Image (spheres, grey):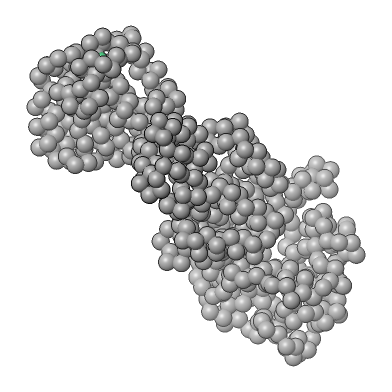
Amino acid sequence: MRSSAQAHIVTTLKNAIAQNRLAQAYLFVGPRGTGKTSTARIFAKALNCVHAPTTNPCGVCDMCKEIAAGNSLNVLEFDAASNTQVDKIREIIIDNVKYAPTRGNYKLYIVDEVHMLSNSSFNALLKTLEEPPPHVKFVFATTDVQKVPTTIISRCQRFDLRRIPTPEIAQHLLFIAGKEAIELTPTAAESIARGAEGGLRDAESMLDQLVAFCGDKIDEQNVLNIFGFTARQTVAELCEHLINGHTGAALGAIQKQSDAGKDLSRLMADLIEHLRNLLVAQSAPETLHEDLSAEAIAELTAQAGRIAADKLLNLIEQFADAESRMKWAANKKMHFEIAAIRAVQTLGQASLTEVLDTLTAIRGGGAMPERPVKKVEAPKTPVAAVAEKKTERPKPAPVSSPAPVAEPAAPVSVPAPAEAPASRPSLSAFVAASIGGSEKKTPAAAPKPDPKVSAEPAHKVEAKPAATVAPSANAQELWPQLVTRVRKDRPLISDWVESGQLTDVSSGVALLSFPPSADLARDTCERPNNRGFLEKLLTELTGAPVTLKTETRAGLVVEKLAREEAKPEPKVDPMEAFKNDPLIQKALAEFKAEILPA
Ligand SMILES: [Zn+2]
């Protein structure tokens, strides 16, 4: 099969042959099975065919036949992986190049997996490469060009071989199957091709195995069963559950795949690929034709219309993180489930684009103001009354409180439902509340202390024993500034950052502490891009370089700084309020739980 994916290389080589402008050495770079060796052999035939130099080697002369069979004396194939030692290189290449070809015009050395050679082998080869006899050509092939010394690369004309498009491989498989009288369904061919990831050789050997297992009738289910692949439909359905916010259904789908013995890492990779395809369907749908059938593209396009691009990017980032964690994890399923729950949460949040659009609308296109971290006046909730309440999760004194423990209720951030506007909470209400600040331009921005707060469901109540260690004074001062900026610049990570608390800033080190229940938040803040962002911000705020350290601190109780959000209506169903509580949602995420209907 001559793949059109490699057409650019064939054209360049043909031109070089036609114009007699050949390089001394070529480097073919590309993944497994993309045709590096086959291309090298075609090149060899073009140079040594009895009609050579020709752009169309005959394929029937003795030279062409010998090359095709791999036993030509003038075309030496050499596998670097099994001949790494310098002695071999000397014997086969270096001492040999000086002899003219016995027949034909050129001696060709095809070195496969060239990156496997030892350093001394590379050095020995380098001398020959610097001044090769005119009758010698080298073709180096590698799957890992990073490991090839630049001294070698710089002496070669480099070609990058592309992955062969999935439909092309599928077509090729159907063609082979037809010749061999194998009944292969088109969906089965597509599944094999997807699994081979652009490697034609891999696809062919997979088909070979299938014939050994299943005989001469092969359908998609055979392919999925034998190789542990997941049907495209299954991945699309899982994604559908996530978009619909059906956490239970999503977890059920993961469980089903796990029960069926599917490789969950593979499923994760497929899901990431699917999300990536959704993104492409939004931005450059025409490029999808290279890898997908028309039917699959139609399905993707429909799904892509229901999810914002920035959320897709966010999901891909989250799942990619989970994928790398899964690689070494004993319990892959748990990591998959956490990622799925987080995905549903992410999708449920207002996207950055939505917020910005709403902001622009409200402000008449004006610049986005800083969102103030408001110090809300304390509701007059008697501490004693609160402490008496039956509460499953008593909350001790806010560590963010600049006030001494004697006045524990000072900065209260608990959004009381009674503060809510009369209308249903909407995004614009939320945004208006956020930007309205102390001016209280909108009804939503009226966080008055309300006596009803003590009548809240238990989970809303903030009982406040003292935290184990109080944050240092400069940490207390810096924290609200940091939170304000994170909320403004990186709203997507603000929840994670605010699950912790800045407890110390000294000698250029800022300590962000997390309670033991917030490991996920700590991990998220530790991710290189987030850490980098936070360090940059801290450096900017303090005016001196700051390194971020995180820790898990037992007994630490984090009090969120006030932010006006769209609140649930006062008469809201307590179960709904419970489910919507950000703390409950976080707990659900951490314990990979879901609330079942009563
Ligand atoms: Zn020939």
Report the residue at 38% width, 49% height from top.
213
Q: Answer above or below: position of 246 versus 105.
A: below
Q: Position of residue 283 (x, y in %)?
A: 63, 36
The quarter of the displayed image where residue 406 is located: bottom right
Position of the N terminus by quadrant: top left
Question: Does the rendering let one see residue 257?
Answer: yes
Q: Which quadrant of the render holds ligand 1?
A: top left
Tell me: 146 left or right of 532.
left
Nearest the camera: 111 or 442?
A: 111
Nearest the camera: 449 or 206?
A: 206
Position of the C terminus by quadrant: bottom right
Q: Position of residue 176 (x, y in %)?
A: 41, 32
Q: Position of residue 565 (x, y in %)?
A: 78, 63
Report the residue at 10% width, 37% height from top.
87
Q: Answer above or below: position of 237 versus 169.
A: below
Question: Does the rendering let one see residue 533?
Answer: no
